[in-house]
Amino acid sequence: MIDSTTAIRDTVTSGENSSGSWIIEHIVDSNVLDFEPFGTIHLPSFEINLFGLSIHLSITKHVVFLWIAAILVAFFLIYTARSYKKSLIPRGIANLIEMIIQFIRDEIVTPTIGEKYIPSFLPFLGTVFFFILTCNLLGLLPYGATATSNISVTASLALLSFLMIQLAGMKKNGVIGYFKGLIPHGVPVFLLPIMFVVEVLGLFTKPFALMIRLFANMTAGHVVILALIGLIFILKTPFISPVSILFALFIYLLELLVALIQAYIFTMLSSLFIGMAIHQEH
């Protein structure tokens, strides 16, 4: 999972973090890639001073797995696109990716935004889906790390969706028309100031919900798995081992489903919010 069982055992039995903070230490970002018992890799850490501000540009564990996810997504999508030059009938991984893209097009983009907007938003939404899914699955590999369990990563993804939502609405309705369309028709004049504030706040609560939902779901599963494994070393009895391992395995398999569902939900809600910004009359 996130670190090896050996590292969990050493941390729990050391007695220094009996309160359970050791779980957080194995989930949060760090400057070390842990491959125990084979060794560790210390990532470079540096910062720059810009206009009196100290900006950390350290390469962390989550940054490394973000790069890996980006490279994998780019590789498989480019591979799928090039496979059509050889044959119009995709095979293998290209066939799977085509099926997923068709699902996003037919079941997400078309119902929520409209068929005429597929060329404009399918590339963005498809890339977001594959990137989040890849990040989620990488965290389930041995020695892996889930970048989407980092609030900074989910905030960045939510910010991209927020910008796409606003740009889509302004491009379709105009800047003034877009903000004017936030006010429902038929609202009494004395409620207009209140409704405008409420609707503007709603623009920010949508990406905030995307950020928190993805972060919380991808973090919770890892916490449960680590807690179940930690019971073996906390209770110090071999009789709890089968129960802990079986339940941890069940949660791990459930995490595979959650990884797919969370990528789908983030993509679906982003598409829905874009459609709401474009079709304000509805």
Image (cartoon, grey):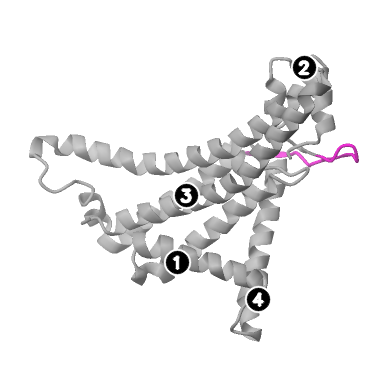
Give residue 189's position: percent from left, percent from top. Answer: 9, 39
Q: CA distance from mark 4 to mark 1?
A: 20 Å
Q: Secondary structure at mark 3?
A: helix
**Of callouts 1 and 3, the N-terminal one:** 1
* Precedes in sequence: disc 1 or disc 2: 1
Q: Residue at x 68, y 33 (%)?
A: 247
- Indicate the amino acid at tag 1: Arg
In the rendered structure, find residue 44 and report the number of the disc placed on it: none
The reply to whether the C-beta atoms of the residues labelled 1 and 3 are less than 8 Å apart is: no
Residue 53 seen in render = no
Residue at horizontal 63 percent and vertical 72 percent from the top:
94
User: Considering the numbered disc 2 on the image, is that residue within a helix, a strand or a loop?
Assistant: helix
Q: Secondary structure at mark 1?
A: helix
- How far apart are the alpha carbons under marks 3 and 4? 27 Å
Lower sequence index among marks 2 and 3 = 2
Residue type marked 3: Ile
Q: Where, by quadrant of the figure, is residue 251 drawn?
A: top right
Residue picked out by circle 4: 91
Report if residue 76 lies within the magenta region: no
Eyeballing the image, is 143 above or below 81?
Answer: above
Q: CA distance from mark 4 to mark 2?
A: 51 Å
Residue 265 marker: 3
Disc 1 designates what residue?
Answer: 105
- Whole-Å distance between the Cαs marked 1 and 2? 50 Å
Q: Earlier in the sequence, mark 4 or mark 1?
A: 4
Residue on which the image places disc 2: 235
> Mark 2 packing: few (<14 Cα in 10 Å), some, or many (20+)?
few
Between residue 4 and residue 190, name the one nearer to us: 4
